[in-house]
Image (tube, grey):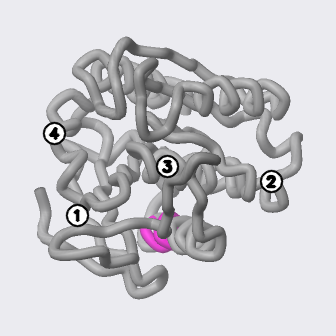
Amino acid sequence: MGTLQKDTVSGLSYRVRLAGRRPAARLFLLHGVGGNETNLMPLADGLDQDIELVFVRGPLTLGAEQYAWFHVRFGEQGPVINAVQADESRLRLRELVRSLAGAETSAPVPAMMAGFSQGGILSASVSLSAPQDVPRFAILCGRILPELEPNLAPPEALTGVSAFVAHGEYDDKLPVTFASHADAWLCRLGVARDTRLYPVGHTLSPEIVRDFSSWASQQINLD
């Protein structure tokens, strides 16, 4: 993968796997809490070579090589997030997408965004608030934040959005009910989605990776 770069507009750091030719799409991949931009690199082998991959590092430092998009604590009532940090990360990711698109001399490359756990949360937040920038997104063992609702794009802007939702039935970090809530919410918004459950915990199983890769390839043909 490429060396770590820093976008001067968003302030976010990232690494890139270039496509074999002019990319058919640009896929932003976001890690979970406590991870870093290298965590999702194993997905690269299964993804179409015509997709440019951008592995983004979260802006909050938790420890050595450990980053996050927002702080969260888990209690009896479920996860409690720092909503201000989550929204700041949403806006910075949108800026990164626009910054890379603005650097192109030809027509902008269609953007997609996907992530694991907290990264999936941010993927949904960016796409559902700025579908003109990211019309395709995937939530891998994550959820849609209820705090996002005031920033949702109008219904007519979401008609062309497509989502992939994958979740483990035995997830002990973010229970599978979050996938059901996400599916129901996307249905109300009129967002096309492919929601799948797997007999695993809070992890990216080979089956999830396979189905996500297939979904991502299908999106190239749609754009």
Q: CA distance from mark 1 to mark 2?
A: 31 Å
Which percent across, then down, holds residue 168? 42, 23
Q: Which mark is residue 15?
A: 1
In the rendered view, tell whether residue 97 sits above or below residue 21.
below
The front one of 208 and 107 is 208
**Which region of the structure is painted magenta?**
95-100
For the residues labelled 1 and 4, say whether their Cβ atoms are less than 8 Å apart. Answer: no
In the rendered view, tell whether residue 202 sits above or below residue 194.
below
Q: Which mark is residue 149?
A: 2
Amino acid type for the residue under numbered disc 3: Ala
Front tag of 3 and 1: 1
For the residues labelled 2 and 3, say whether their Cβ atoms are less than 8 Å apart. Answer: no
The residue positioned 57% from the left and 19% from the top of the image is: 194
The image quadrant that residue 61 belongs to is bottom left
In the rendered view, tell whether residue 61 sits above or below residue 189.
below
Evaluate whether residue 79 shows in this view: yes
Q: Secondary structure at mark 3?
A: strand
Q: Upstream in the sequence, badge 3 or badge 1?
A: 1
Q: Secondary structure at mark 2?
A: helix
Q: Main secondary structure of the magenta part?
A: helix
View extreme (bottom): residue:
8
Q: Is residue 99 magenta?
A: yes
Front tag of 2 and 3: 2
Q: CA distance from mark 1 to mark 4?
A: 14 Å
Q: CA distance from mark 2 to mark 4?
A: 33 Å
Q: Which mark is residue 42?
A: 4
Bin the neighbour count of mark 1 within 10 Å (Cα to Cα): few under 14, some 14-19, many 20 and up: many
Front tag of 1 and 2: 2
Q: Secondary structure at mark 1?
A: strand
For the residues labelled 1 and 2, say whether their Cβ atoms are less than 8 Å apart. Answer: no
The image quadrant that residue 115 belongs to is top left
Q: Which residue is mark 3?
A: 111
